[in-house]
Image (cartoon, grey):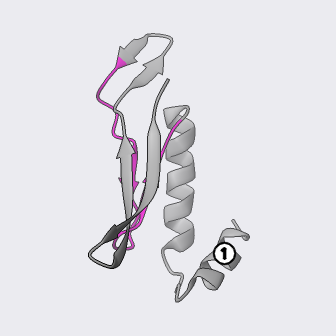
């Protein structure tokens, strides 16, 4: 089993998002504790947390990076609209 968690927090009145993952990865060949499950997108402060089959997650992350590369996001409604187009 692997673990990825996200939580909303307050830092002296400023909203924050706290992210936490383990480093465990499994395959038919064995288990390792060296897998980074958080990847940064090009936008400052944007993180993707990955789980599942590593190669599938990697393809999805590359797709998100390419999709958001030239998008202007000014509010949550714009982000929601863009996500519905992926």
Relative horizontal placement of residue 72, taking residue 46 as reference (left or right): right
Which residue in the structure is indicated by mark 1? 80
Q: Is residue 28 above or below residue 18?
A: above
Relative vertical location of residue 40 with respect to residue 30 in this rendering, above or below: below
Q: Residue furthest top?
A: 29
x, y (%) of residue 72?
A: 52, 86
Please state the horizontal and vertical placement of residue 37, each as a whole percent of the image: 39, 42
Residue drawn where x is 38% and y is 52% of the image: 19
Picture quadrant of residue 78: bottom right
Q: Which residues are magenta?
A: 32-51
How many residues crowd around disc 1 within 10 Å: few (fewer than 14), some, or many (20 or more)? Answer: few
Which of these two is toward me, 11 or 77?
11
In front of the other: 7 or 31 = 7
Number of numbered callouts drawn: 1
Residue 34: x and y in percent read 29, 29
Outermost right residue: 84
| Residue 52 in magenta stretch | no
Please report the residue visible at 48 percent of the width from the left and 74 percent of the height from the top.
69
Q: Quadrant of the C terminus?
A: bottom right
> Which residue is at 47% across, 29% downward?
2
Q: Secondary structure at mark 1?
A: helix
Quadrant of residue 13 within the rendered picture? bottom left
Q: Is residue 72 above or below residue 10?
A: below
Name the side, left or right, on which 49 lies relative to 71.
Answer: left
* Magenta span includes 35: yes
Residue 36 is situated, as x and y percent measured from the top left of the image, at 33, 40
Q: Is residue 55 above or below residue 65?
A: above
Q: Is residue 53 left or right of residue 29?
A: right
Q: Main secondary structure of the magenta part?
A: loop
């Amino acid at each position: 089993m692997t673990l990825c968690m996200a939580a909303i927090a307050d830092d002296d009145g400023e909203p924050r998002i706290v992210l936490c993952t383990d480093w465990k990865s499994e395959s038919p060949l064995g288990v390792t504790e060296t897998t980074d499950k958080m990847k940064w997108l090009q936008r400052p402060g944007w993180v993707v947390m990955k789980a599942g089959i590593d190669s599938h997650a990697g393809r999805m992350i590359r797709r998100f990076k390419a999709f958001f590369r030239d998008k202007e996001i000014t509010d949550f409604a714009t982000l929601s609209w863009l996500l519905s187009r992926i």
